[in-house]
Amino acid sequence: MANIMDVQTEDNLQYHFFPVSHGSVQFKVRTANDAHLALTMGPQESDPMYEVFIGGWGNTKSVIRRNRTKPDKVEVDTPQILNSGEFRGFWVRWDGGVVSAGREGELIPFMSWTDPEPFPVAFVGVCTGWGATGTWKIEDGAEFDTPDKLEYKFGPAAAGSLEFEYRGPHNAHLCLTSAAAEVDPMYEIILGGWENTQSVIRYCRQKPDKVTLPTPGIMHPNEFRKFLIEWRCGRVMVRDGSSGALLMEWVDPAPFPVTHFAVRTGYGARGHWRIRHFGSGAGGQQLPPPSAPVAAPLYSAPPGYPGAGGPGGPGQWIDMSAGQVPPGAVVGGQDCNGEPMYVARAAHEGAVIPGKLVQSHGAAYVPWGGLEHGKPEYQVLVGGFNNWVPTKGSNIPPGAFPGGQSEDGETLYIGRVRHKGSLITGKVQQSHGVCYISFAGKELSFPKYEILLS
């Protein structure tokens, strides 16, 4: 367990900051009301900044706020959530832009918000105010128990990886789902089952198991064992968390978007867990923070690009490269592992083609000539609009945003479709009556799609 830091906060709304090494913090606080946390890039109040207020407004409500501005991003009723006479335990996580807060021992958050423009958090600040003083015991990382009961405890899976440590005699069960419930489709991973003799990957709670591996003695009742679960576009992998060695792997031919995970123990076992989940790129490495400067100095739309104009307004195209994402980038879709896809475009064969940017790949992709083309240099759409409407064929609705042009000079629009568990952005060519996307090396066409309006 991480070291515990004791902090006293006065009734003055001044944050006490400390560094954090990863995307969660667990704490206990004793106060009558208004336990405030700030998540920042540095050890001071500065934008960008998330604030999590627990037990505000006389211990009646809790909110998530960004950059100290209203309206609040989330507001929930939490009457008497704090107590001046006893410590109450909570956790706060920030993973892949998902900011969530929950009670100690509960994996399902009581409030959560997804930031379309996430930033790397390096410091956490705590304070109290509005008539309250507080005593805090702060730890980084969540730890909890599961009873000998085959009931899953659910939590949000921000993106493609989940790292955990488990201490128990056998039967560490973990599932990946598209909802906070046991619903199909569903992946299940059982480690140390059958009296700590074998481990399996199971699909939709059905037998035969997709993978079976002899693992005698993989778990221990008095020692934490570390594991890493990864899922990307249907590829489910289980690794030894210490060595990185691949233990089990299975590829789902019809993948689905994983949004939640859950854990449980049973068959005579109680388990103790430490869990860390985070957004990842290939190989389970954490995504680098956006490294681009602000958009204005970088704006240089080439002559003839549709939508060209001055920086700062909606619908501007910003030069980027090697996976860079500018502030305010339009999120148009989502990879099947949960990673966001940004609206991008690039020049190819005399055309300017809308496509997708996947940050962890370090490139944008555009569809052309039946193939998917990777582009390390590209432009990203920046603006305040993100209005998608369904349409089909050559029906281009009024206000559709022009995103490029074909090699013949025809205007290309920005569309998106759902395919193989992903929501993928691409180009709409009216004369063809379809939306084209790039996927797995190919250009695919769809007569029904959503189109972006300005």
Image (cartoon, rainbow, N blue to C red):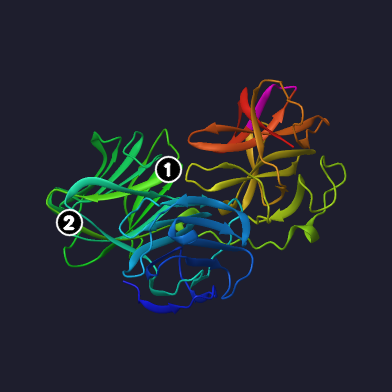
Number of residue marks: 2
Q: Quadrant of residue 31?
A: bottom left
Q: Quadrant of the C terminus?
A: top right
Q: Which residue is mark 2?
A: 270
Nearer the N terminus, badge 2 or badge 1? 1
Q: Is residue 18 among the parts visible in the rendering?
A: yes
Q: Could you classify mark 1 by the number of other residues whose Cα lies within 10 Å: few (under 14), some (14-19), or many (20 or more)?
A: many
Q: Is residue 404 left or right of residue 247?
A: right
Residue where numbered disc 1 is placed? 258
Residue type at mark 1? Answer: Val
Inspect the image, locate mark 2, and give the three-letter code of the amino acid beneath it. Arg
**Whole-percent x and y of residue 59?**
43, 60
Q: Secondary structure at mark 2?
A: loop
Distance (Cα) linking label 2 and label 1: 26 Å
- Pointer 2: residues within 10 angstroms few (<14), some, or many (20+)? many
Q: Position of residue 230 (x, y in %)?
A: 40, 51
Q: Secondary structure at mark 1?
A: loop
Looking at the rendering, the stretch of residues picked out in magenta corresponds to 431-436
Q: On residue 212, which mark appears? A: none
